[in-house]
Image (cartoon, rainbow, N blue to C red):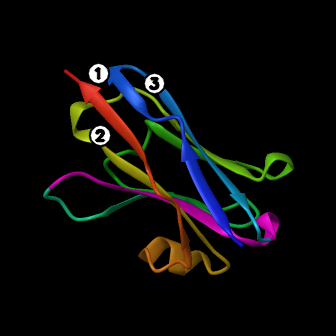
Amino acid sequence: QVQVVESGGGLVQAGGSLRLSCTVSGLPFDDYAMGWFRQSPGKEREGVSCISWSGAKTDYADSVKGRFTISKDPAKNTMYLQIHILKPEDTAMYYCTTDRNYWAVVAGNSAYWGQGTQVTVSS
């Protein structure tokens, strides 16, 4: 059974930093692309960042470029999203997702999703 579990969210002041984690089990981690999406109340889900199975390719939404960094640690079956210079508009539920197909992850059509971790940024 595949499990996708996010952690690391919390309440942070604007300008602060957080590191989100996503641990996956039940599938060959090294073969899967992964990504982060976010959604806040009343807004559509937004793609934040994606990383290929090898880690060689990454993509970021324009709104987070230069502040967010995505990475994978195959030894821990875990993906990370390092977030710096948090802004109130970053407040959202952050979801981890994974699929063998990188472009399915980019499109938000991936096979597996976590339950999310809440990030709240106070001004």
Q: SS of the residue at dot 2?
A: helix
Side of 56 relative to 103 (left or right): right
Give the residue type that dot 2 points to: Asp
Q: Distance between the residues labelled 3 and 2?
A: 11 Å
Q: Distance between the residues labelled 1 and 3?
A: 9 Å
Give the residue type that dot 1 points to: Ala
| Residue furthest left in the image | 42
Callout 3 environment at 10 Å: few (<14), some (14 to 19), or many (20+)?
A: some
| Residue furthest right in the image | 75
In percent of the image, x 43 and y 74: which residue is there? 108
Side of 38 relative to 43 (left or right): right
Q: Mark 2 points at which residue?
A: 90
The image quadrant where one finds the N terminus is bottom right
Callout 1 environment at 10 Å: few (<14), some (14 to 19), or many (20+)?
A: some
Proximity of marks 2 and 1: CB atoms separated by less than 8 Å: no
In percent of the image, x 61 and y 60: which residue is there? 4
Q: Earlier in the sequence, mark 2 or mark 1?
A: 1
| Stretch in magenta | 28-41
Q: Which of 62 and 22 is in front in this view?
A: 22
In percent of the image, x 60 and y 63: which residue is there? 34
Give the residue type that dot 3 points to: Ser
Question: Residue 22, image x and y in percent?
Answer: 61, 50
Q: Mark 3 points at which residue?
A: 17
Q: Name the residue under label 1.
A: 14
